[in-house]
Amino acid sequence: MEPRSFDPSRERHAPKRLTGVSLRGVERSLEVTTTTLVAAIKPKCDGCSEFVHGDLKELDHVTVVLVSATPGDGEWEGAQREILVAPTVLSELEICSAPYYVLIDASSSIVVTEGALMSPAQVASEIERYLV
């Protein structure tokens, strides 16, 4: 058995649209049309920093959406990718705290796996079998 960052996930429905606000206060709505990794991040989080400021080359084969419950008080200025401030999305996905991730299968709108968010390489390794 391979080591995992969590107990086996329970399948549950995921929203087809992720709606929130950008760090600049612009309302955003992203449709989930491909396999999507939702990475729940928070301020002052070492594991989250690589997702915010890194290149995520290990996750090039999946759509990555960064979601936070709060805007991060300027900590994320210069982020490599957009951050969606969307506490409702976290609630809909049943993410109780960050750092955490869920992988959504867009064809069925189901969360197929989930776990602790520690590094892009760790997440890529844990989700790879779901991307076939």
Image: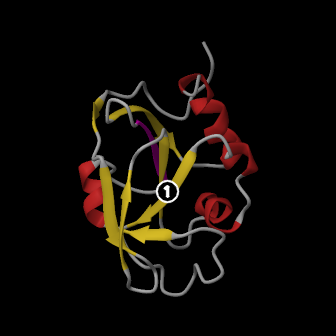
User: Which residue shows up at 31% across the image and 36% down it?
Assistant: 109
Taking the spot 43% from the left edge, 27% from the top edge, the residue there is 7
Residue 103 or residue 42, whichever sits in front: 103
Q: Inspect the magenta stretch and tell me whether residue 16 lies in it.
A: no
In the rendered view of the protein, which quadrant contains the N terminus? top right
Residue 104 painted magenta: yes
Q: Is residue 106 above or below residue 31?
A: above
Residue 10 sits in which quadrant? top left
Residue at 62% in and 28% down: 128
| Residue 19: percent from left, percent from top | 31, 64
Q: Is residue 3 above or below residue 28?
A: above
Q: What span is colored magenta in the figure?
A: 99-105
* Picture coordinates of residue 35, whole percent (x, y): 48, 38
Q: Count numbered badges in the picture.
A: 1
Amino acid on which disc 1 is placed:
Val
Q: Secondary structure at mark 1?
A: strand
**Quarter of the rendering occupied by the C terminus:** top right
Please name the residue shown 63% across and 63% down the image.
46
The quarter holding residue 131 reads top right
Q: What colour scheme does the image use?
A: secondary structure
Mark 1 highlights which residue? Answer: 65
Magenta span: helix, strand or loop, mainly?
strand
Would you place residue 4 above or below residue 90 in this image?
above
Counting from the top left corner in percent of width and height, residue 25 is at: 38, 85
Compared to 61, does 88 lie above or below? below
Q: Residues within 10 Å of mark 1 (few under 14, many from 20)?
A: some
Q: Position of residue 59 (x, y in %)?
A: 66, 45
